[in-house]
Image (cartoon, rainbow, N blue to C red):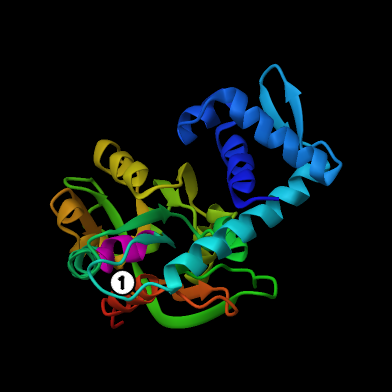
Amino acid sequence: MKLDQLQHLMAIVEHGSLRSAARRLDMPQPALTRSVRALERELGVSLFARQTTGMVLTAEGVRFHRRACVISSEARRAREEVQHPGPDYEGTVSVALSIMPHLGMLPDALSVFRKTYPKVKLNITESLMPAVEGALRDGSLDFYLGAAPWQKTAPGLAMQHLCDNTRVVVCRKGHPLARVRSLKSLAGADWASTTIDYNAEEDLARLFAAHGQAAPRVMLSAHSALSVQVALVQTDLLAMLPRQWMDFAMTRDLLDVVPVRGRLPAPAIVLARRPDLPLSPPAEFFCDVLLRGLPRV
């Protein structure tokens, strides 16, 4: 079994077909086919079911692919860890950030990181903890920084509480409810919600219930900051978002904060990673410069 065979298998899974994977790997399709067949012969199982719609992992293939991802990530880390830190360091840092660090921490951290590690590629995913647990466990993500999940994660990941945060109610400029001061006054509004966990509407309902109000009508559920911004600017939807939205240059000139009385808590900000995998020098540095932007609430 060779490392390149594992990478070939991972490329087929990612792209869904031999043709697309071969194009991505810049290798002839027959050579890729021979690589996979040789791996299947060595293992004594079929890893893929070859269908008209593409290549689909068998049950054995699913289990093997999970291990292959871990092995490939470990090999990448091993190569990178023997390099000396500095401007000639080459490698990749892969992280997942929720909306709050995207807006409040990433802008200042990027320039510092690029000056220190100009040859290191950054892979940044906008996501939340429940969705990236698998990638953290198999090593394809170095760390997650962002909103804490409501439910406790399964053993095997270290989660560090970094700080608490607050939210604000946000609307477009000129919104008819832009100057109200209580959640009760917003009872009839339609809302947009970001995905804090697998049930974002329940999260918003908890906040309203804490103020003695019925759950609001959530008419749009978004998985990205851009979707939320477009919806708020172009409609009368409201959203309850991390307060860092209003400090960010790309949003503060387009949106207003509804001056609702009282503190609106947000999920805590956490750092999650595998405790048994040391971060590479650039991953550790990137984490450090991000943490310099932690908010004081």
Residue at 57% across, 74% down: 274
Res. 262 visible in picture: yes
From the viewer's perspective, is 230 left or right of 268? left
Res. 263 visible in picture: no
Most foreground residue, 176 or 154: 154
Kind of residue at disc 1:
Arg
Residue 260 rendering spot, x and y as whole percentages: 30, 66
Q: Which residue in the rendered view is the most extreme toward the top?
A: 52
Reply above or below: 114 against 20: below
Most foreground residue, 143 or 6: 6
| Label 1 CA crowd tier, 10 Å (few <14, some 14–19, many 20+) | few
Residue 250 rendering spot, x and y as whole percentages: 17, 52
Residue at 41% across, 47% down: 192
Q: Secondary structure at mark 1?
A: loop
Q: Which residue is mark 1?
A: 261
Residue at 66% across, 20% down: 53
